[in-house]
Image: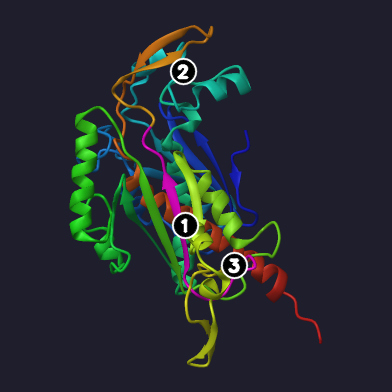
């Protein structure tokens, strides 16, 4: 099971949902970066369970410990290992899942692929695995903050069939002003009520997260396999519960003609810019200096508190009632995870860009 992401700034996550703990090892972090648990914890607090009335009631403080790679408050350039203990694990809630496959979960595919699995909360397929990603993303975020003006903001644009207006103002304060993390107040209230309604019926809903990466330089990404949006796509579609990814106009762009969709160039304040941004900040796999805009679709939480038809390990048809503590909608807690993965992609490409195109100079 490959558990490594990135080329120069790399992470390896480990741990299971109801095991002793979860964590990450970062390799490739530059030395002398001021770093402590205080830089990591705020991002984990945004991701942790039990933070509001529309999330899972599992109570986890998710306190991070840095075990290696930092000395006297600065990174040493060696691997950084970070750990979060599981404090409120209840593996007994999953005893029935040892024999029965949960609909739309990874139980059947894992069992068939490996012949042995950890059914407690889904093991590696649980969203608790993303703790390591968020912790590593916090390191990437600090590097970007200290060395550039790059800003990554993710926010909820849709829950079920409730969407926010396309012209809503996007800011960090507006995103964090409500528990659903939608920057449009009126829409946020309706989204919260929809999630509560689903929970009251033992059901769940999905939604869409949009992300904007601002102030990127021109030139990140490669024109073939390592296109900037391709690496973003891999990062986002590796997240639990994701079912779709699009950049810029995405699928809506198929409804336009070339004359309508083309982003025309102009000289604006001495810089080459585009009049529109239907490309989503990426052309030919390479960033063009405009905001990178992408969206990620999250399906409804698979575990619902309703009896459903399934089969057991022997292939016999049976039924299963979902148990345990689960989010009726994973989308609000996905915001810091999407930002973390995006920041790691940006940092990794910045390092690759410097190594290939800036580190060495040759006479023309």
Would you name the residue on which mark 3 appears?
350
Q: Tell me which corner region of the image, top left, top right, bottom left or bottom right, holds residue 48.
A: top left
The residue located at (28%, 67%) in the rendering is 168
Asked if one can make out residue 280 in the rendered structure from this viewpoint, the answer is yes
Q: Give the range drawn in magenta.
A: 283-301
Would you name the residue on which mark 1 appears?
139
Mark 1 and mark 3: span between their CA atoms? 15 Å
At mark 3, the secondary structure is: helix
Q: Quadrant of the N terminus?
A: top right
Q: Which of marks 1 and 3 is in front?
A: 3
At mark 2, the secondary structure is: loop
Instruction: Indicate the position of residue 205 as horizontal and vertical percent values.
Output: 32, 38
Instruction: Indicate the position of residue 128 as horizontal and vertical percent values.
Output: 41, 36
Q: Is 35 situated left or right of 62 in this image?
A: right
Q: Is 247 situated left or right of 320 in this image?
A: right
In the rendered structure, are the residues bearing label 2 and label 3 in contact, judged by CB atoms less than 8 Å apart?
Answer: no
Q: Residue 100 carries which label?
A: none
Q: Nearer the viewer, mark 2 or mark 1?
A: 2
Q: Residue 101 carries which label?
A: 2
Instruction: Indicate the position of residue 276 as horizontal and vertical percent values.
Output: 47, 77
Colour logic: rainbow
Q: Determine if the magenta segment contains residue 226.
A: no
Disc 1 crowd, CA 10 A, few/some/many (<14, 14-19, 20+) = many
């Amino acid at each position: 099971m490959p558990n490594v992401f990135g080329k120069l700034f790399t992470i390896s996550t480990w741990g299971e949902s109801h095991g002793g703990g979860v964590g990450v090892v970062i390799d490739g972090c530059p030395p002398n970066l001021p770093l402590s648990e205080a830089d990591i914890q705020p991002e984990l607090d945004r991701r942790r369970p039990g933070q509001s009335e529309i999330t899972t009631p599992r109570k986890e403080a998710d306190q991070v410990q840095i075990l290696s790679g930092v000395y006297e408050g600065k990174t040493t350039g060696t691997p950084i290992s970070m750990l979060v203990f599981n404090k409120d694990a209840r593996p007994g809630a999953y005893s029935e899942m040892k024999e029965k496959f949960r609909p739309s979960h990874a139980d059947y595919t894992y069992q068939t692929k490996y012949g042995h699995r950890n059914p407690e909360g889904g093991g590696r397929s649980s969203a608790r695995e993303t703790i390591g990603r968020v912790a590593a993303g916090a390191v990437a975020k600090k590097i970007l903050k200290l060395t550039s003006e790059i800003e990554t903001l993710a926010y909820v644009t849709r829950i079920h069939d409730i969407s926010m207006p396309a012209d809503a103002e996007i800011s960090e304060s507006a995103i964090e002003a409500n528990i659903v993390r939608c920057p449009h107040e009126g829409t946020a209230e309706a989204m919260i009520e929809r999630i509560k309604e689903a929970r009251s019926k033992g059901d769940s809903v999905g939604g869409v997260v949009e992300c904007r990466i601002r102030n990127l330089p021109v030139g990140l990404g490669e024109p073939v396999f390592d296109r900037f949006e391709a690496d973003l796509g891999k990062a986002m579609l590796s997240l639990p519960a994701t079912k779709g990814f699009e950049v810029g106009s995405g699928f809506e762009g198929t409804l336009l003609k070339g004359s309508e969709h083309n982003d025309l160039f102009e000289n604006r304040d001495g810089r080459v810019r585009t009049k529109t941004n239907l490309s989503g900040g990426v052309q030919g796999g390479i960033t063009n200096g405009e905001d990178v805009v992408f969206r990620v679709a999250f399906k409804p939480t698979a575990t619902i508190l309703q009896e459903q038809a399934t089969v057991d390990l022997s292939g016999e048809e049976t039924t299963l009632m979902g148990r345990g503590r689960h989010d009726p909608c994973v989308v609000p807690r996905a915001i810091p995870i999407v930002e973390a993965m995006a920041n790691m992609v940006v940092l990794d490409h910045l390092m690759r860009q410097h190594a290939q195109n800036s580190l060495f100079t040759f006479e023309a």
